[in-house]
Image (spheres, rainbow, N blue to C red):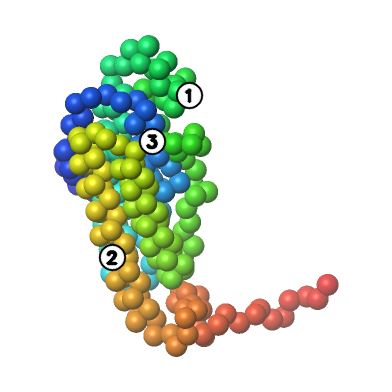
Amino acid sequence: MFLYEKKLQFPVKVATPNPKLASFIISQYGGPDGELGAAMRYLSQRYAMPYAEAKGLLTDIGTEELGHMEMVAALVHQLTRNLSDEEVRNNASFAPYFVDHTTGVYPTAASGFPWSAGGMQSTGDVIADLTEDLAAEQKARLTYDNILRLSDDPDVNNVIRFLREREIVHFQRFGECLRLCKEKMDAKNVYLTNPAFDRSPTPQPRTGMAKG
């Protein structure tokens, strides 16, 4: 059960529309390493986590990512509001998006590929999922780094820096959670197994199957 507070986690107030910049930032809404994928990944993975600490962390961070989606959507909306036809025509990077979505906020990558669940995974395996989560946070941080390299708008950059910092914090929390889970699993080798299914250090092959 979520409690929704009707304000953004960090204020978004962009003074100057810039559709070209919006066409880059949209990638953190629905791109391969964006906030939509992060929220879906963590809130899906939480169900198979055998440890309360990991389940709680995934719920907390997944919920926060929903808030980050709002912030990125607000950036895109404010950067594209009240555009004239001429402003759209003069922005080659934004015009293809405009053809399909006008100025509606749509989950897509900056490259034009729409969001797909194929870019995320929920395996039900503690180590596999948390390792993917660590990589996801690093890739999201990198995307925000790249946006900062392309943006000269201080109103935008303040928001992007805040979001970037949260990715770093999430990476740290997932690292701590992975270490905690490994300690709970108490395995002696690096190929830690899924406690929900694997009762021995390595999965055993099934026997008694008919030979072809």
Identify the residue under disc 3: 24
* Residue 151 numbered tag: none
- Answer above or below: position of 62 versus 25: below
| Location of mark 1 (residue) | 96
Q: Quadrant of residue 12?
A: top left
Query: Hey, which residue is sitting farthest bottom in the picture?
Result: 188
Does the CB distance between marks 3 and 2 fall below 8 Å? no
Q: Nearer the viewer, residue 37 or 83?
A: 83
Q: Which mark is residue 172?
A: 2
Q: Total marks drawn?
A: 3
**Separation (CA) of disc 3 from disc 2:** 26 Å
Q: Mark 2 to mark 1: distance in Å? A: 38 Å
Q: Residue at x 29, y 71 (%)?
A: 176
Q: What amino acid type should be assigned to the residue bearing mark 2? A: Gln
Crowd rating for badge 1 (residues with CA inside 10 Å; few <14, some 14–19, many 20+): some
Residue at horizontal 16%, vertical 38%?
11
Q: Dot 3, crowdedness within 10 Å: few (<14), some or many (≥20)? A: many
Instruction: Residue 118: tell me if it is visible.
Output: yes
Q: Is residue 21 left or right of residue 196?
A: left
Q: Could you tell me which quadrant the C terminus lies in?
A: bottom right
